Image (spheres, grey):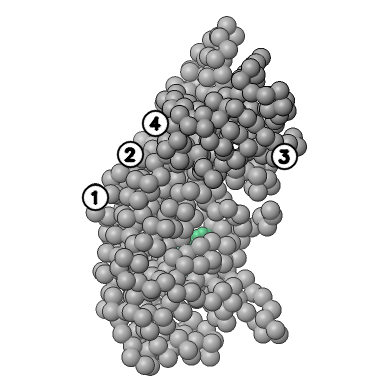
């Protein structure tokens, strides 16, 4: 089999491609087929007088997403998608598709989500999945190169680890079981056996909120390292993120271009160190005059942008009537862009004042909400690592600093409003302290006995973190919602397809 992403090796020779009709256009004695085969898209030109009657017949009955086998000569062509074009000598139909529900016109997101099984074939969705794959592969590469062992933690578990409010409960042969919210506690056991490990698996949270950052089923990479303190943990997380971003930019530039990702926004963190600050400092920044001013400026710049867009909209509307066909098309697609951007600005008008209020009134001791993270990150073009959190808002297993008030946790916040992509910490390694915590939080000690054993038998300082794959993919791809970063998203109100 020859695939579209290998066409460069077959220029001026005759080959056969198997795939699906992505786009179809005919004009008189010519048919233009944009063929996709999973690896890419290429244009196939069928000329009536260069193929058999049978092949012409086949070519003219094709419809969007029909499956076909196309034979032809590969020509290098700069102007064509992917830089090549096929001069077709034969077309053989595998199946003529029924009327395909997803057409090149705009569809609402609900419709697209209901057709997720088909939507995955569309260019942007295809590109996002390729980037996801590259990110996952990069993470494996990163850890394997550092002698980490990948191990798997169970999905059915007997205990909560990240609070009891987001647990999915199931019936496990008359016993209660929960779907894992994290592999961490098991990861700690594995680190005591192997030193450096990471787990990668699906995790589950009964998130009742519908936000663009929350799924009920998401994938997490969780390294756990014996003899690592918080500082070493932060260094590892930073190196890992830098490696992922670098790899994505290097290896998936084509996909990022399809996604219209502004790569210059990712570039800084290939070279620059991340910003590190303690929670208390982050709170000060959030409540500062400068931050309030920044939000006011943002609002003002939106007003200007809105005016410019509306002026442009007027101007191109006037032009549209008398424009040539090709120009009309351009105008129409620009009109769609403008409408989308204006919607976004509308949303910003509603949000920015709320963000400002939330930031100004933020009280030390609270957890950051999504908007607080966004506001905090407005001033940085690299990720920010926030450490030393009020202990009461962090999990029971986190070690505390000398004051016993602050947890040695770390959240890594991504720039551009993507929020928390990593949560991690140094772990409490004292048996007595952990027992106290479990009692304080009124957790069922019995289900944690095995975990406490890790502190009874050769307890050592250790640390780890969890990287949410979907949030990372959303950020690197520049997608506004995590639902487009996983093949079949699971969210509140969405179980199908
Ligand atoms: O901060 P979290 O809850 O940390 C843990 O679960 C730790 N036990 C990890 C560890 O130390 N081994 O979750 C880690 C990351 C978050 O930063 C976020 O990226 C992602 O998991 N995440 C979600 N992603 C999508 N939807 C959700 N509902 C998510 N909840 C967390
Ligand atoms: Mg967290």
Q: How crowded is mark 2: few (under 14 residues within 10 Å), some or many (20 or more)?
A: few
- Label 2 with label 3: CB-CB less than 8 Å: no
Q: In which quarter of the image is residue 232?
A: bottom left
Along the polypeptide, which appears first: circle 3 or circle 4? 3
* Relative vertical location of residue 225 with respect to residue 269 in this rendering, above or below: below
Q: Is mark 1 on a helix, strand or loop?
A: loop
| Distance Cα–Cα, label 2 vs label 3 | 43 Å
Judge whether 158 appears above or below 33 on screen: below
Separation of residues labelled 3 and 1 (CA atoms): 52 Å
Residue topped by disc 1: 272
Mark toward the start of the polypeptide (1 vs 2): 2
| Residue 46 showing in the rendered view | yes
In the picture as drawn, the residue positioned furthest to the right comes out as 98
Quarter of image, res 99: top right
Q: Which disc number belongs to residue 301?
A: 4
Q: Which of marks 4 and 2 is in front?
A: 2
In the rendered image, the residue lying farthest to the top is 322
Q: Distance between the residues labelled 1 and 2?
A: 13 Å
Picture residue at 51% right of the left edge, 62% below the top: 219
Give the number of the disc on residue 95: 3
Q: How crowded is mark 4: few (under 14 residues within 10 Å), some or many (20 or more)?
A: few
Q: Which of marks 1 and 4 is in front?
A: 1
Mark 4 residue element: helix
- Tell me which numbered mark, 4 or 2, is placed earlier along the sequence: 2
Q: How far apart are marks 4 and 2 (CA)?
A: 21 Å
Marks 1/4: CA–CA distance: 28 Å
Q: How many labels does the image show?
A: 4
Along the polypeptide, which appears first: circle 2 or circle 3?
3
Q: Is residue 310 above or below residue 285?
A: above
Residue annotated with mark 2:
264
Whole-angstrom CA distance, mark 3 to mark 4, is 52 Å
């Amino acid at each position: 089999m020859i695939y579209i992403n290998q066409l460069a090796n077959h220029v001026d020779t005759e080959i056969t491609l198997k795939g699906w009709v992505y786009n179809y256009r005919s004009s008189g004695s010519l048919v233009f087929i944009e063929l996709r085969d999973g690896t890419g898209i290429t244009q196939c030109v069928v000329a009536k007088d260069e193929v058999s009657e049978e092949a012409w017949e086949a070519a003219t009955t094709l419809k969007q997403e029909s499956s076909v086998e196309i034979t032809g000569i590969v020509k290098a062509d700069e102007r064509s998608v992917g830089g090549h074009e096929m001069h077709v000598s034969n077309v053989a139909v595998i199946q003529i598709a029924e009327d395909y529900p997803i057409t090149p016109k705009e569809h609402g997101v609900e419709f697209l989500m209901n057709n997720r099984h088909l939507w995955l074939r569309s260019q942007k969705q295809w590109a996002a999945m390729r980037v996801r794959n590259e990110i996952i592969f990069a993470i494996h590469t990163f850890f394997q190169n550092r002698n980490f062992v990948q191990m798997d933690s169970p999905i059915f578990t007997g205990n909560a680890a990240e609070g009891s409010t987001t647990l999915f409960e199931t019936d496990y042969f008359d016993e209660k079981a929960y779907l894992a919210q994290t592999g961490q506690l098991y990861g700690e056991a594995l680190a005591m056996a192997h030193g450096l490990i990471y787990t990668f698996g699906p995790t589950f949270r009964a998130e009742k909120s519908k936000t663009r950052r929350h799924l009920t089923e998401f994938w997490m990479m969780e390294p756990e390292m014996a003899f690592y303190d918080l500082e070493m943990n932060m260094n590892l997380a930073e190196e890992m993120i830098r490696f992922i971003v670098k790899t994505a930019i290097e290896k998936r530039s084509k996909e990022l271009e399809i996604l219209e990702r502004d790569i210059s926004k990712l570039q800084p963190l290939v070279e620059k160190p991340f910003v590190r600050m303690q929670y208390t400092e982050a709170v000060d920044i959030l409540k500062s005059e400068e931050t309030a001013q920044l939000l006011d400026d943002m609002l003002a710049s939106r007003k200007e942008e809105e005016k410019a867009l509306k002026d442009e909209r007027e101007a191109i509307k006037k032009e549209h009537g008398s424009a040539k066909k090709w120009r009309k098309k351009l105008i129409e697609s620009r009109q769609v862009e403008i409408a989308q951007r204006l919607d976004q600005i509308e949303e910003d008008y509603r949000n920015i004042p709320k963000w400002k209020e939330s930031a100004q009134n933020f009280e030390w001791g609270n957890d950051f909400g999504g908007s607080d993270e966004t506001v905090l990150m407005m001033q940085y073009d690299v990720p920010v690592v926030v450490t030393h959190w009020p202990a009461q808002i962090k999990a029971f297993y986190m070690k505390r600093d000398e004051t016993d008030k602050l947890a040695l946790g770390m959240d890594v916040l991504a720039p551009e409003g993507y929020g928390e992509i990593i949560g991690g910490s140094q772990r409490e390694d004292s048996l007595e302290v952990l027992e106290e915590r479990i009692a304080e939080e009124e957790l069922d000690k019995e289900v944690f006995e095995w975990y406490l054993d890790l502190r009874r038998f050769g307890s050592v300082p250790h640390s780890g973190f969890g990287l949410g794959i979907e949030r990372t993919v959303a950020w690197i791809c520049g997608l506004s919602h995590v639902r487009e970063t996983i093949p079949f998203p699971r969210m509140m109100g969405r179980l199908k397809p």
